[in-house]
Image (cartoon, helix red, strand yellow):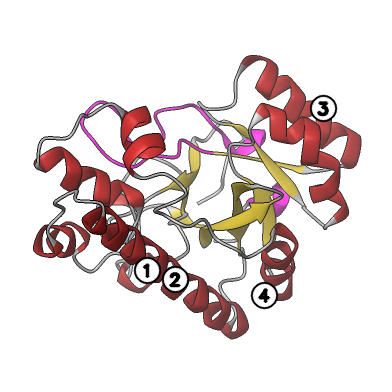
């Protein structure tokens, strides 16, 4: 089917194989022309797509990376599909995430916070574990639902060790595998302090069309893109739930770089 510039797309959604709620087979039935499932440090959702998805699929992933003392997320898009070399590399990142989150649960338990292993394993199922799985376990045993207290308090960096893989390594791995690197929901202060560094490391694009990137943050992202010829990407960062749906934030074919449009 011929795409039109006004066709709605979503190049950033999450499935149940990460910290999303929906099965890949449900996501691909969304009323968008192009879809990219960008789970955290895993591409396992792509092993569970139906034979005839409703949308064009842009294979993608959201990789955690170390930027100075901070952790950011780099989207990797693969219009020609995942190479075998990238599949091997991302599997290492998947297992590292599993070890780090599991170690965080152990640290909680050692500090007297009674997260049960059975509850954690039931919450994760066959997904790759994320802190959101742990948050649901904490809420289940009566801890506050306040996201700031959960993530900055109980699930802080002392207990849940951030990744040690650098942005340069992540960007290089994406490009070596035939992909395109884009900075996911770039924070304002990090764009100001580290934007030039990421460009120097070879970053190709930046997520501008996103509900998280508005106001001054959006203007800064656009200026960074214009100043360095970065590709524009966009999506909802959809994780599931009843209040929102895939494609709820308007992003169209015409909003993003042509390099991110997969062939039919």
Considering only order in the chain, which callout, 4 or 3, is on the residue closer to the N terminus?
4
In the image as oriented, which residue stretches furthest toward the front?
Answer: 111
Q: Residue at 31% of width from left, 58% of height from top?
A: 107
Instruction: Quadrant for residue 263, please give it.
Output: bottom right
Whether residue 169 appears in magenta in the rendering, the answer is no
Dominant secondary structure, magenta: loop
| Residue assigned mark 3 | 223
| Magenta span | 235-260
Q: CA distance from mark 2 to mark 3?
A: 33 Å
Instruction: Quadrant for residue 85, please give it.
Output: bottom right
Nearer the camera: disc 4 or disc 2: 2
Q: Residue at 74% of width from left, 68% of height from top?
A: 172
- Checking the image for residue 177, the label placed there is 4
- Checking the image for residue 94, the label placed there is 2
Q: Are marks 1 and 2 in contact (CB under 8 Å)?
A: yes
Nearer the camera: disc 1 or disc 3: 1
Specify whether residue 36 is in view: yes
Q: Is residue 133 left or right of residue 157?
A: left
Q: CA distance from mark 1 to mark 4?
A: 23 Å
Residue 72 drawn above or below residue 178: above
- Checking the image for residue 98, the label placed there is 1
């Amino acid at each position: 089917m011929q795409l039109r510039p006004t066709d709605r797309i979503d190049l950033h959604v999450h499935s149940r194989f990460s910290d999303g709620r929906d099965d890949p087979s449900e996501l691909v039935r969304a009323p968008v022309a192009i879809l990219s499932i960008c789970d955290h440090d895993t591409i396992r959702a792509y092993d569970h797509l139906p034979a005839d998805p409703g949308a064009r699929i842009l294979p993608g992933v959201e990789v955690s990376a170390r930027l100075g003392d901070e952790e950011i997320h780099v989207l990797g898009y693969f219009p020609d599909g995942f190479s075998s070399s990238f599949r091997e590399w991302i599997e290492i990142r998947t297992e590292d995430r599993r070890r780090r989150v599991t170690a965080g649960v152990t640290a909680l338990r050692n500090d007297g916070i009674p997260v049960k292993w059975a509850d954690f394993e039931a919450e994760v199922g066959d997904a790759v574990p994320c802190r959101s799985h742990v948050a649901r376990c904490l809420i289940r045993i009566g801890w506050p639902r306040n996201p700031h207290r959960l993530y900055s308090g109980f699930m802080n960096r002392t207990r849940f060790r951030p990744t040690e893989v650098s942005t340069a390594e992540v960007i290089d791995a994406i490009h070596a595998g035939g992909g395109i690197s884009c900075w996911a929901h770039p924070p304002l202060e990090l764009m100001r302090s580290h934007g030039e560094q990421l460009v120097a490391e070879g970053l190709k694009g930046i997520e501008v069309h996103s509900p998280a990137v508005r106001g001054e943050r959006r203007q800064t992202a656009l200026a960074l893109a214009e100043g360095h010829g970065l590709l524009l990407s966009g999506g909802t960062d959809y994780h599931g739930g009843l209040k929102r749906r895939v494609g709820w934030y308007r992003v169209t074919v015409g909003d993003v770089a042509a390099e991110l449009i997969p062939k039919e």
